[in-house]
Image: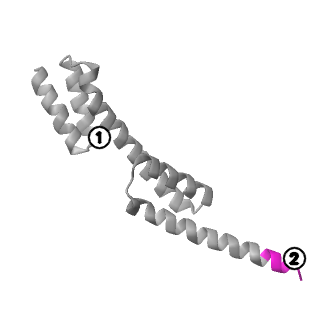
Amino acid sequence: KKGEARAALKKAVGTQDEGHLRSAIKTAEGAGLTPKDLEPARAALKALEAKTAARKQLREAIAAKDMDMLRAAIRTGKAAGLPGEELEEASKVLAEEERKAAARSGLKQAVQNR
């Protein structure tokens, strides 16, 4: 039973699927595997959860077009190990919002100097 649980854990880590990992960890715990046996699967699950949370934060920041949210979401995505292409849209939106803010600031300055 323990051997099957170890094999299932190893397979689950390879799938990069949160649900599959949770299920395999639960099964492995029930089979009596040690915390050391479970460590790689728990680490993989934690990393996947961080990526999922970072993707959600990126989506929300892009929708809000808020520069602070975008900067934070990009930092979180990098820290979670998301590939650059997943951060690209947020970076583009941030650059556009920064351009808009600079233009607004320039316009405000021009109006004040009239």
Residue 50 position by quadrant = top left
Q: Which residue is mark 2?
A: 112
Out of 86 and 62, give the one closest to the viewer: 86
Q: Magenta span has 111?
A: yes
Question: What's the residue at 62%, 56% (across, down)?
Answer: 68
What amino acid does circle 1 point to? Glu
Q: Magenta span has 5?
A: no
For label 2, the SS is: helix
- The part of the chain drawn in magenta is 108-114
User: In the drawing, does residue 107 fall left or right of residue 37?
Assistant: right
All told, the count of numbered labels is 2
Q: What secondary structure is the magenta-colored segment mainly?
A: helix
Residue 87, image x and y in percent?
Answer: 44, 60
Residue 18: image tag: 1
Residue 50, compared with residue 39, is above or below; it is: below
- Between disc 1 and disc 2, whose residue precedes? 1
For label 1, the SS is: helix
Question: What's the residue at 72%, 74% (across, down)?
Answer: 104
Quadrant where the C terminus sits is bottom right
